[in-house]
Image: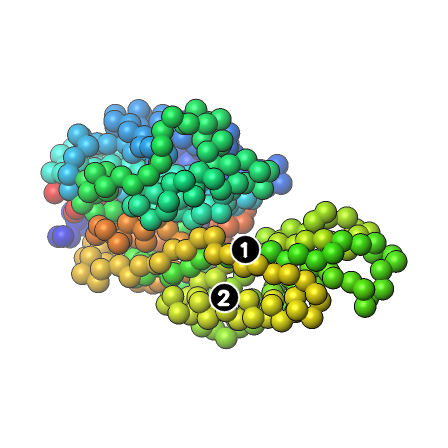
Amino acid sequence: MTSAAGAPGAVPDGAGFDRAWSSLLPVGRAPTGGYHRLAWSDADLGCREWFRQQADAHGLTLDEDHNGNQWAWWGEPGPDAVVTGSHLDSVPGGGAFDGPLGVVSAFLAVAALQAAGVAPGRPVAVVNFSDEEGGRFGLACLGSRLMAGEVDPDTALARTDPDGVTLSEARSRAGFGDRRPGPDPDRLGRIGIFVELHIEQGRRLAVDGVPVGVATAVWPHGRWRLDFRGEGNHAGTTAVADRHDPVLPLAHAVLAAREAAATGDALATIGRVEAHPGATNAIASRATAWLDARAPLPEGVRAAVGRVEDAARAAAGREGVALTVAEESWSGGAEFRPELRAALAAVVEGRLGKVAQLPTGAGHDAAVLAASVPTAMLFVRNPTGISHDPAEHATRADCLAGVDALVAVLASLCR
Ligand code: GLV
Ligand code: MN
Ligand code: MN
């Protein structure tokens, strides 16, 4: 890859960014603030429609695969393609930037290259990967992992959301029921390189004082479900000695997750819990906690999960509560190719003057693709580091710097 600091006239169009960004902002706003764009929901379908309109507006050819991923091709879909994009779904009550910034920037970057009269020497595509967050069915990066053959389609289709709706039903309701998900080696084989731009989900770039960074690695991470089964009873009449309260061992699991994280070797979080039947004046009969664990190496993740499970089992034993633990999702993480990230860093530095290189504990489709194709990521500064929350934010100037960097990278790659 050569420096593209001189990509002729290919500057991001600030007004174009504002238009694209503001056209997506109303889609899937949560009444409580932030965004609720869960896979195959009406909000997600609204995002997909927005993608189609953007593809059309930029003269790109729309192509929607059987895993729900959307592709917009500049030129014929073909081999050795330069692909850029991210995802449009969100976590429940998420922010506006996680995912959409990469898709909006991808369209803007293509538009900048088109406006500069660049004739790409290889196919270029913008992608919206389906269900990256796993916010509804619990399987992270589902669209890219199905494409890569990493998830069994039947297992995925049988997954249920919190209302008991299966993925299969949700896809049917969305008019997608006749497309069977599964491995897509031909499509994967067409990707010559994938570059995902994403808001940083931490404060490293803010601390370093640089608007754009290049990813070195994505940590491995996974999700576990802990089901505690006790005995429901009256809160006002049941003596402590007679209780089998499933919420107590659940509380020990929460504390153990924090202790595992406090070692500094891993991060472990319980961010979702349910107690059944959920009455203030009743001891719950069962309770469920979902554990998210991440670390630089898989062994670190396993060690953290082991600590939480041990603590939960010990407490469950003391309370006479049964515990089952199931791994719901596993993402192996990725170390991006050093020569590719060095090349990207040189291009970004040539364009913006400075760049940082950093790993991330957040999950990305880029990490899934990295197992099969050359892959890289650009991060855009997040002043507070807050993410997966309505307060997630990047300044307009930094978003434009991100588009600028992506333009330079694409110009260099598609020569
Ligand atoms: C997705 O953003 C994740 O890190 O889980
Ligand atoms: Mn996310
Ligand atoms: Mn994301």
Q: Which quadrant of the view contains residue 321?
A: bottom right
Residue 36, x across and y down, in percent: 53, 39
Residue at the image point whose x is 65% and y is 66% from the top: 316
185 and 106: which is toward the camera:
185
Left or right: 204 as drawn, with respect to 313: left
Find numbered disc 2 in the image and state the secondary structure of the residue it sits on.
Answer: helix
Find numbered disc 1 in the image and state the secondary structure of the residue it sits on.
Answer: strand
Residue 349 appears in the picture as rendered: no
Label 1: few (<14), some or many (≥20) within 10 Å? many
Residue 283 appears in the picture as rendered: yes
Q: Which residue is mark 1?
A: 225
Residue type pointed to by label 2: Val
Q: Which residue is mark 2?
A: 305
Residue at the image point whose x is 42% and y is 59% from the top: 221
Left or right: 355 as drawn, with respect to 385: left
Q: Earlier in the sequence, mark 2 or mark 1?
A: 1
Relative to 207, residue 326 above or below? above
Residue 202, x across and y down, in percent: 44, 59
Residue 262, x across and y down, in percent: 53, 73
Q: Residue furthest bottom?
A: 263
Residue at the image point whose x is 87% and y is 57% from the top: 236
In 3D space, how far apart are the residues under numbered discs 2 and 1 (Cα atoms)? 11 Å
User: Which of the image's four quarters has the C terminus?
Assistant: top left
Q: Which quadrant of the view contains residue 81?
A: top left
Residue at the image point whose x is 61% and y is 64% from the top: 254
Residue type pointed to by label 1: Arg
